[in-house]
């Protein structure tokens, strides 16, 4: 599973394939899937993390069901741009997952995605209890939508 740049992803993603956005939390894995036209990100039910093999099985099931052609992993870099333990955990997850599926992976800076997701859920008047259940998938949707918007700009420049 090669780690790619967004430009490489734009060149190599097969037509009709979708992307999955991941937001790795300590207890959950937030999920979002693009449409086939790579225009909109749609949240999916999160995976409650148990242990890696169980988590990976659920992710593989989603990949097979949703015709996924690439993975976008949110990279939780610190506000000053440095890498902390959460960045290492995200990279380790992908390193282990690469042994199970050969898909291109794009790491995407996710700074402030959780803040944006929280704000959006507040604006929709989602209760505190429901926000905690949806926040990781909402963050994954913000991460993936950022990638889709950038891909659209890259594709437009190539025309």
Image (cartoon, rainbow, N blue to C red):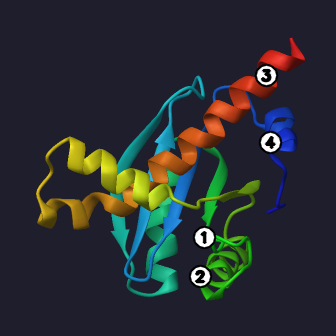
The x and y percentages for residue 63 are 54, 52
Asked if the residues shown at circle 2 and circle 1 are in contact, with their CB atoms under 8 angstroms apart, the answer is yes
Q: Can residue 60 be seen in this view?
A: yes
Side of 50 relative to 77 (left or right): left
- Disc on the earlier residue, 1 or 4: 4
Q: Distance between the residues labelled 1 and 4?
A: 20 Å
Give the residue pinned by disc 2.
Answer: 86
Residue projecting furthest to the front: 80
Give the residue pinned by disc 3.
Answer: 155
Nearer mark to the viewer, of 3 and 1: 1
- Disc on the earlier residue, 2 or 4: 4
Give the residue pinned by disc 4.
Answer: 9
Classify the position of the C terminus by image quarter: top right
- Disc on the earlier residue, 3 or 2: 2
- Disc on the earlier residue, 2 or 1: 1
- Disc on the earlier residue, 3 or 4: 4
Give the residue pinned by disc 1.
Answer: 76
Q: Distance between the residues labelled 2 and 4?
A: 24 Å
Q: How far apart are marks 3 and 2 (CA)?
A: 32 Å
Q: Determine whether the residue tagged by mark 1 lies in a helix, strand or loop.
A: loop
Q: How far apart are marks 3 and 4 (CA)?
A: 11 Å
Residue drawn at point x = 86 percent, y = 33 percent = 11
Residue drawn at point x = 56 percent, y = 27 percent = 36
For label 3, the crowd category at 10 Å Cα-Cα, with few meaning under 14, some 14 to 19 and many 20 or more, is few
Q: Determine whether the residue tagged by mark 2 lies in a helix, strand or loop.
A: helix
Residue projecting furthest to the top: 159
């Amino acid at each position: 599973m090669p780690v790619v740049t967004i430009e490489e992803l734009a060149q190599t993603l097969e037509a009709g394939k979708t992307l999955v956005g991941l937001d790795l939390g300590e207890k959950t894995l937030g999920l979002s899937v693009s449409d086939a036209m790579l225009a909109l990100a749609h949240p999916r039910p999160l995976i409650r993390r148990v242990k890696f093999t169980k988590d990976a099985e659920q992710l593989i099931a989603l990949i097979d069901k949703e015709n996924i052609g690439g993975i976008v992993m949110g990279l939780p870099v610190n506000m000053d741009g440095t890498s902390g333990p959460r960045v290492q955990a995200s990279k380790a997850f992908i390193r282990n997952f690469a042994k199970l599926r050969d898909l291109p992976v794009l790491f995407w800076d996710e700074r402030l995605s959780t803040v944006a997701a929280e704000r959006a859920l507040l604006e929709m008047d989602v209760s505190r209890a429901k926000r905690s259940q949806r926040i990781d998938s909402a963050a994954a949707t913000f991460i993936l939508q950022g990638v889709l918007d950038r891909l659209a700009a890259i594709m437009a420049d190539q025309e």
